Image (cartoon, rainbow, N blue to C red):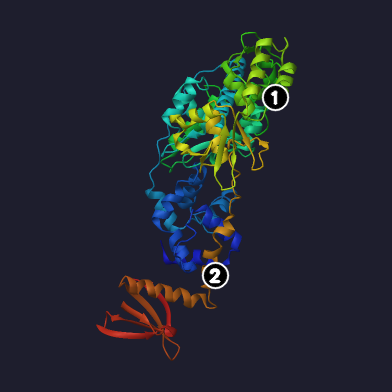
Amino acid sequence: MTASDARALATRLATLDPDALAALLDARHVAPHTSWTDFFDAADGLLDPAQLHRALAEVSDVEAAALRDALETGRPVDATLRKALAARALTDEDGTPYDAVAAALASAATVDAAPVITGTDESDAASAERAFDAAASLADILHSATRTPLARIGSGALSAGDRRRLVDAGAAASPDDADILVGIAEEAGLLAGSERSWTVTAAGSTWLGTRTVERWLEVAGHLRDQLPSALRSAAGGWRPLTEWPGAYPFDPAWPDRVRRLVAMLVHWAVLAPDGRPPTWAAGLAVGTHADADALRALLPHEVDKVYLQNDLTAIAPGPLEPRLDLRLRTTARRESRAQAATYRFTAETIGAAFAAGETAASLTEFLTELSLTGVPQPLAYEIERAATRHGTLRVGPDRQGYTRLSGQRDLLEAINVDQALRPLGLVADGEDLVTRTSVDTTFWMLADARYPVLAVDADGAPRSPGRHDIAESAAPETSASERYRPLIETLRASLSDDADAAWLERELEQAVRTRATIDITIRMPDGSTRDVTLEAAGLGGGRLRGRDRAADVERTLPLSSIVSVRPV
């Protein structure tokens, strides 16, 4: 880093408005609470070799080529890239790379650009079939996460237990597929990841009620729009896949990341295994839209009716419309997923539907409208019996702030010795049981354990508790201007009317700190100048102290007489 570069950058930073300065600091991932006290500190920090090597990880292959060309030819970076590079303090406003950037670029190691596509081609119909299967599998994963959030391990990956659970449930064909599908859901905003879990978002719940083509289109659009900027084309699509491996030549994590991105696009059938989009998805690659009608024509027809059987099963003669499937799953357990799916009703599943807010009347009305064969007597009897049992156990808040369970004595005795419910810490209180655990948590633990529980409020009126299956809306992200406001205020407070004097003092402070030998130009009383070589030793009281190398004497010079400083 040369002193002229640092000074030029410091001067430029000082002229930026707060929003532009915050955007630059954000683009370079500067910590908002860094200890910089003035713009000279900021320039030094941004041109620090370690900081620049981190910044190069986000430099695209096109930008790297432009920087190298500018350094080799001496010409500024092309105008189309100049603004983006200057906005990250990698070049000045004229497009000339800083010397420190040139040094970092020369020493940066490039990553191995291995091919990311090795598959073969397939027909549009085969791609459409994969699209249908992927949408159905992702819906199964969201249904599972609605009941129980997906566990996340320290590395950010899906836990081994949940990978097996999703495979065993038929939601994913393999553990690797489960990982890819969860990644797709997170990219599309259908799952929200926290430190320990993934939870279904409001968008995910809405998505579950939409039809297959709309499901696929929504996720495909998100996957394209979330691609890193270096992969996007000017028209809004993406660059040829052969260019993807080298898109971020200095990012050591890029090879793994690009393989994961391609795997998601192939799994979702945005790309065929050979890397080409199916004909009906070609619009995505060029920045427009997929052909929804062409895709719909290749998918199996969705049905809105089922056959209800005497053996307490429902058989859908084709893929059931998602909104109907969503509600039916709250009442019955799906046993097979094919173009003719099977659902089974049990006392437990019907009880769970009542726990979720259904009533005997609403459930019978829904099944009557859904069925091609009416509601068989065995199913009607099971609904009536479940309705009779439902509410024999009541859970709600009491006046002392506890959660109170009341109901039949034998039911409460069974609950009190149920090992699965030990975490509730239930204790007897007269004829009831009480716990410090919240009403909703207690309710769902009892419901999951298949007890006929009814939630009530403080007045005893029935209520339908939420299962916390929807991820809480994320707080609005703090803007860069707000995050960096204290730092920018500190930097701007350091500005003085005499920038030359401030920079001179800065250079002298650095020289004293490193005990450097410097050439100093001094203005004499008669207006002439004289050069002195000093080993800087101290600075204070408006004076510089150091040893004159030529005369081998200690000198003290007033700062007001020093014109310039140069390293020896």
Q: Quadrant of the N terminus?
A: bottom left
Classify mark 1: helix, strand or loop: helix
Q: Is residue 544 left or right of residue 168?
A: left
How busy is the neighbourhood of tag 2: few (under 14 within 10 Å), some, or many (20 plus)?
A: some
Residue 467 at least partly seen: yes
Residue 277 visible: no
Residue 179, x across and y down, in percent: 48, 29
Give the residue displayed 49% in from the left and 29% down from the top.
Answer: 413
Measured as percent of width and height from the top left, residue 459 is found at 67, 42
Question: Toward the viewer: 392 or 347?
Answer: 392
Residue identifier under label 1: 292
Gap in angstroms between the C-alphas marked 1 and 2:
54 Å
Q: Give the quadrant of residue 469.
A: top right
Residue positioned most to the bottom: 526
State whether residue 308 is above or below residue 508: above
Residue 461 locus on image (x, y percent): 68, 38
Left or right of 404 on screen, residue 364? right
Q: Position of residue 126 (x, y in %)?
A: 58, 15
Q: Secondary structure at mark 2?
A: helix
Q: Residue furthest left?
A: 552
Of the numbered discs 1 and 2, the one sitting upstream in the chain is 1
Tell me if residue 153 comes above or below residue 368 in the rendering.
below
Residue type (three-letter) at the residue carrying disc 1? Ala
Residue drawn at (40%, 80%) of the image: 521
From the viewer's side, name the closer residue of 332 and 316.
Answer: 332
* Residue 492, numbered label: 2
Query: What type is the residue that disc 2 sits on?
Result: Arg
Q: Quadrant of residue 312?
A: top right
Determine the residue positioned at 53% across, 31% down. 446
Of 514 and 140, nearer the camera is 140
- Residue at left 49%, top 67%? 39
